[in-house]
Amino acid sequence: MGTSGSYGGSAKQVWKDARQQILDLPPGAGSGDSGGGEQPSEKPLEDLWGSIGDALDSDDPSLHRPIVDESKIALPALIPWLGRPGRGSSGSDGGSDGGGNGRVRSGAGRQGSGSRRQVTRSAARGGAALGAAYAVRRGDADYLKELGLDLTRLQGLSPIRQCAEILDAVLGEGAHPDEMALRKASLEALKDVLTKGEPPDEMVSLRAFVVSYVFELSLVELQRQVNEGALSPDGVAKKERTIRVYLEKRVQDLPIPGGGVIQPRDLRTRAAELTKEVIKLLRARGGGTP
C-alpha cells in the first residue's frame, strides 16, 4: 500500500483516525453485492474517505478557499526552472529535462518532512503534464514550448519515452512520497493519452487523473499500517481495491468545473479546481454533490 515504505505518516490526529478506519474496514465493505439504493456496507468507506478529505483539507489551506489562486498555479510558479539558462526546449541535445542537462530536482513540490503538503498546486502540476500529452496528440507546439518542450522531438519518440520526457520537464525529480504519488498518478494518465490509438476525452482523463492522485496521496499516509505489520500483503491489495473503487464511484458524476471544450493549457487549472471539489465532496460524507 502506498508509494514509499520509508515515510512514517503524519502525526495529526485526523490522519491517525483515518489509519484506524482502514484497519477497521469490514472485508465486504463496498463490494457491490447488494443491489439498489445506498448499500449499508458502504458507510465505513464513506466515513473513511470523509476522514481522508478532512485530513487533506487540514494539510493544505488552499483546499477550503473559495477559488483557486491563479498566481499560485501559473506555469512559472509550478515549474520554477522554466526560462533558466540551459533549460530551453527539449530539442537542444536530447536531455530528459527539456534542456539537455539531465533531470532537474523539483523546486515546486514537497521536499522535506517539515514542508507543507500542496494538494492543489500538485494537482495543477499534474494537469499541466496531462495537457502536454494532449498537446503532443494535437500537434500543439505552442503549449509545449511554454513547458520547455519541443513537439518535433517528442513526435520522434516512443509513447513511453514521451511520457518520461513530459514528466521530467513538468514535474522534475522529487524524493518525497507526495512527489512519487503525483508522478505515479500522472504517468497513469499520460499513458492513457499517449499509448492508445484514440486518446480518451479530456474530461474523462482529467477525472481519472484526479481520482488516481487523491487515491495515491491517501496511500502515502495509510502506508504506516503496512510498515507496522498491521496489514498482510493480501489484506493490503483487497483494501486498496475497495477504497479506490468506492472513490471512483463517489466522484463519477461530479461536474467538471468550467465545462465546455478543454484545451491542453486549461487542464492545469481544471485539475486544481476538480481536486478541490472532490475533497469537498468527500468531506460532505453522504451529503451529495457540492
Image: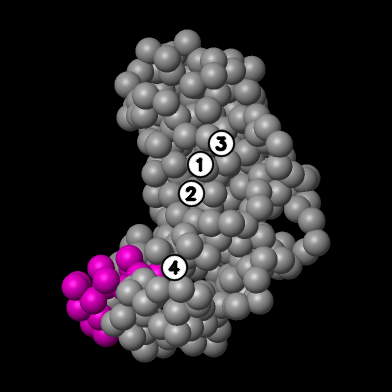
Name the residue tied to disc 1.
205
Name the residue tied to disc 4.
246
Amino acid type shown at disc 1: Ser
Alpha carbons under labels 3 and 4: distance apart: 22 Å
Alpha carbons under labels 2 and 1: distance apart: 5 Å
Name the residue tied to disc 3.
202
Q: Residue at x 65, y 71 (%)?
A: 288
Question: Alpha-carbon neighbours of circle 2 within 10 Å: few (<14), some, or many (≥20)?
Answer: some
- Taking the magenta stretch, the answer to whether it contains residue 234 is yes
Q: Nearer the viewer, residue 87 or 197?
A: 197
Q: Where in the figure is residue 56, as x and y percent of width and height?
A: 58, 70
Segment colored magenta: 229-243
Amino acid type shown at disc 3: Glu
Q: What is the secondary structure assignment of the residue under circle 2?
A: helix
Residue 94 seen in render: yes
Alpha carbons under labels 4 and 2: distance apart: 13 Å
Which circle marks residue 208 in the picture?
Answer: 2
Amino acid type shown at disc 2: Ala
Alpha carbons under labels 1 and 4: distance apart: 18 Å
Q: In the drawing, does residue 96 fall left or right of residue 260?
A: left
Q: What is the secondary structure assignment of the residue under circle 4?
A: helix
Which circle marks residue 242 in the picture?
Answer: none
Mark nearer the N terminus (3 vs 4): 3
Mark nearer the N terminus (2 vs 3): 3
Amino acid type shown at disc 4: Tyr
Q: What is the secondary structure assignment of the residue under circle 1?
A: helix
Question: Alpha-carbon neighbours of circle 1 within 10 Å: few (<14), some, or many (≥20)?
Answer: many
Q: Nearer the viewer, residue 208 or 67?
A: 208
